[in-house]
Image (cartoon, rainbow, N blue to C red):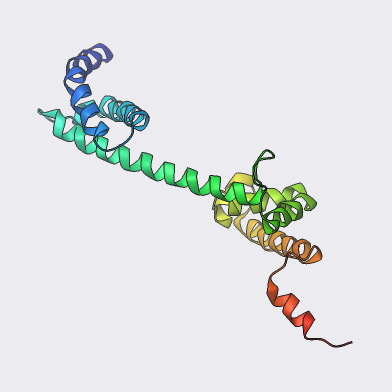
Amino acid sequence: MDAQTRRDRFEQLAPGLIEPLRRFLARRTDAATADDVLADTLLVCWRRLDELPEEPLPWAYGVARNCLANAERGARRQRRVAAKIAVVDPPTETTPGPVEDDEQVAEALARLRPDDAELLRLWAWEQLTPAEIATVLDITPNAASIRLHRARQKLGDELRKTGGGSGHEESREEGRTT
């Protein structure tokens, strides 16, 4: 099918899909997400135009359902990342200020080498595995794993220096007599 024929076919089908899909999505999510998912759904319909059945609406509902699930997963990931960022690196104009432990983590991260801090952020904020971090940093997975281990140790050392380590070490110290 040539490009003009594809375009003509899509332009014939799309008007019959848009409003039913819009209503379908509006009953399941907020307006902004519905609009985004509708656009994604139409894009899939365009890309897979040759696979559309004779009656395309039920098929398009299935596509919309999958696109909505993807959008919801993405929104959940964004909320988790935002929550982690707010804990580790809170905005400067927050009220009330972050709790003491969060400030200590942010300060400890700031004292690390930038490469180590970035490695920890990729691991904690982006929830990347060492293999995925290796791809981002263009290093081997083994090197990423070793660097991550060392960076975590350095962060722990920094936290212990400022009294931000876990209570485990502190409780051992309290038991000693001099």
Task: Examine the rendered structure and indicate whether residue 161 appears above or below residue 70.
Answer: below
Q: Position of residue 25 (x, y in %)?
A: 26, 33
Q: Quadrant of the N terminus?
A: top left
How many numbered marks are there? Answer: 0
The residue lying at 81 percent from left, 65 percent from top is 161
Q: Nearer the viewer, residue 18 or 50?
A: 18
**In the visual, does 125 lie left or right of 178?**
left
Q: Nearer the viewer, residue 5 or 114?
A: 114
**In the visual, does 124 lie left or right of 175?**
left
Q: Position of residue 10 (x, y in %)?
A: 22, 18
Quarter-wise, where is residue 173 in the image? bottom right
The residue lying at 60 percent from left, 54 percent from top is 123
User: Is residue 171 among the parts visible in the rendering?
Assistant: yes
Q: Quadrant of the C terminus?
A: bottom right
- Return the residue found at the far right: 178
Q: Nearer the viewer, residue 105 or 36?
A: 105
The residue lying at 48 percent from left, 45 percent from top is 79
Q: Position of residue 91 (x, y in %)?
A: 65, 41
**In the visual, does 109 lie left or right of 8?**
right
Quarter-wise, where is residue 30 in the image? top left
- Return the residue found at the far left: 54
Q: Position of residue 105 (x, y in %)?
A: 70, 56
- Return the residue found at the far bottom: 177
User: Is residue 134 among the parts visible in the rendering?
Assistant: no
